[in-house]
Image (cartoon, helix red, strand yellow):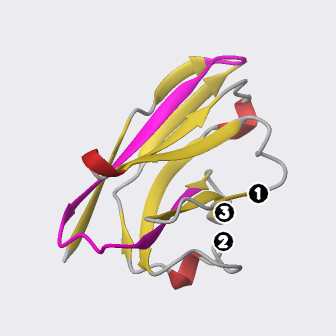
Amino acid sequence: QVQLVESGGGSVQAGGSLRLSCGVFGYIPSSYCMGWFRQAPGKEREAVAAISVGGGSTYYVDSLKDRFTISQDSAKNTVYLQMNSLKPDDSAVYSCALRYGWCRNNWYSVTSYNYWGQGTQVTVSS
């Protein structure tokens, strides 16, 4: 069993930055895909970014890749999402998700992930 725990959310003014963390606990695969997703009220969950942990390849939604950066610290079993130049439209609950194996081309598929964290709220005020 794998447990994911997010942290780092909060409230920030437009233009500010936040760094989200996703810690992996329990039975940790040697290689896996970790994705970050977000869901705003009344909207569907959408992919933000993903990283192949153990390989290093990163994937981004085109509209966010200039402001968001995903990274990993293998020694800490933690994946980060650095978010810069935040906008009110970035406000959402951000969740990390894990699936076995490399991310590959369908990394953005919500249903392809095996485990999810509880989510952390990000609120950006104008």
**Distance of label 2 from label 3 (alpha carbons):** 8 Å
Q: Residue furthest front?
A: 55
Q: How many C-alpha atoms fall within 10 Å of the one at disc 3: few (<14), some, or many (≥20)?
A: some
For mark 2, what is the residue?
108
Judge whether residue 96 is colored magenta.
Answer: no
Circle 2 — which element? loop
**Distance of label 1 from label 3 (alpha carbons):** 9 Å
Q: Residue furthest right?
A: 63
Q: Are marks 1 and 3 in contact (CB under 8 Å)?
A: yes
Residue at (63% x, 74% y) in the render: 107
Position of residue 49 in the picture relative to residue 34 (left or right): right
Q: How many C-alpha atoms fall within 10 Å of the one at disc 1: few (<14), some, or many (≥20)?
A: some
Q: Are marks 1 and 2 in contact (CB under 8 Å)?
A: yes
Judge whether residue 14 is colored magenta.
Answer: yes
Position of the C terminus by quadrant: top right
Position of residue 51 in the picture relative to residue 60 (left or right): left
Q: Is residue 78 above or below residue 3?
A: above
Q: Are marks 2 and 3 in contact (CB under 8 Å)?
A: no
Q: What kind of residue is marked 3?
A: Glu
For mark 1, what is the residue?
61
Q: Is residue 90 above or below residue 72?
A: above
Q: What kind of residue is marked 2?
A: Tyr
Q: Residue 116: x percent and y percent?
A: 38, 67
Mark 1 or 3: the one toward you? 1
Q: Residue 118: x percent and y percent?
A: 34, 57
Q: Which residues are magenta?
A: 13-37
Circle 1 — which element? loop
Q: What kind of residue is marked 1?
A: Val
Residue at (23% x, 71% y) in the render: 2
